[in-house]
Amino acid sequence: MKTTTLINRNLTRLFAAFAFMTAPIAGTSAQTAEEDLDAKYATELLKPQTVAPDFALKSAEGKTVKLSDYKGRYVVLDFWASWCPDCRKDAPAVVNLSRQYKKKGVEFVGVSFDTDKDAWMKAVKTFGMDYTHVSELKRMKEAKVSKAYHINWIPSLYLIGPDGKVVLSTVMSSKLADALARIFPDCAE
């Protein structure tokens, strides 16, 4: 009986010590999994103030789309693929941002790493991605645009400024939302 009481008392102390050591310090916030994503997956993306590489990619309709066509406007590049679970999960947030900031002239361009055009178009339709979409119809590791933008994880998002320079590179749509809200405070929800 004495041994059981002693063990229980020690376990209680151990749990209390663990809770104290893992609690956030006053004045700081606990690190969230979301905060870790860029540190883990966006480390090689182009940094802010880097000139965004121009590209010429085909839309599903065969039209050539160039980043330089959008000079003078904010552009969001959404690197994704229909087969990517995280991309599918993030698609509604990106679609909402595109609709919210369209009235401010922000252009969204989806850059797909699908190799199957039908799967690509089906996903565009399913998610209501009513903005420009382009693809080389090559896998991420084989696509020239992927190499130019240092894409090693999808979804990856870039916000390009009117001057053609990177404003933000992230794998998190919430950071894109924050950046757009800072630029267009009258449009933020």
Image: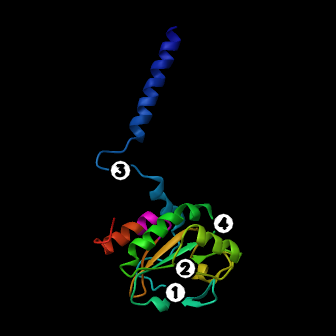
Q: Is disc 3 in contact with disc 1, using a CB cutoff of under 8 Å? A: no
Asked if residue 141 can be seen in this view, the reply is yes
> In the image, is residue 78 above or below residue 23?
below
State the residue in front, 84 or 186.
Answer: 186
Question: Residue 104's spot in the image, x, y percent?
Answer: 35, 79
Mark 4–mark 1 Cα distance, whole angstroms, equals: 26 Å
Residue 171 sits inside the magenta stretch: yes
Left or right, 68 with reference to 183? right
Residue at image mark 2: 149
Q: Is disc 2 in contact with disc 3, using a CB cutoff of under 8 Å? A: no
Residue at image mark 3: 29
Residue 46 sits inside the magenta stretch: no
Residue at image mark 4: 83
Under tag 2, what secondary structure? loop
Sequence order check, earlier mark of 2 and 3: 3
Left or right, 189 with reference to 11? left
Sequence order check, earlier mark of 2 and 4: 4
Mark 2–mark 4 Cα distance, whole angstroms, equals: 20 Å
Asked if residue 152 can be seen in this view, the reply is no
Sequence order check, earlier mark of 4 and 1: 1
State the residue in front, 27 or 96.
Answer: 96
Sequence order check, earlier mark of 3 and 4: 3
Which part of the image, by quadrant, shows the C terminus? bottom left
Q: Between tags 3 and 4, which lies in front? A: 4
Q: Which quarter of the figure has residue 128?
A: bottom right
Mark 2–mark 1 Cα distance, whole angstroms, equals: 7 Å
In the image, the segment drawn in magenta is 170-176
Question: Residue 100's spot in the image, x, y percent?
Answer: 39, 71
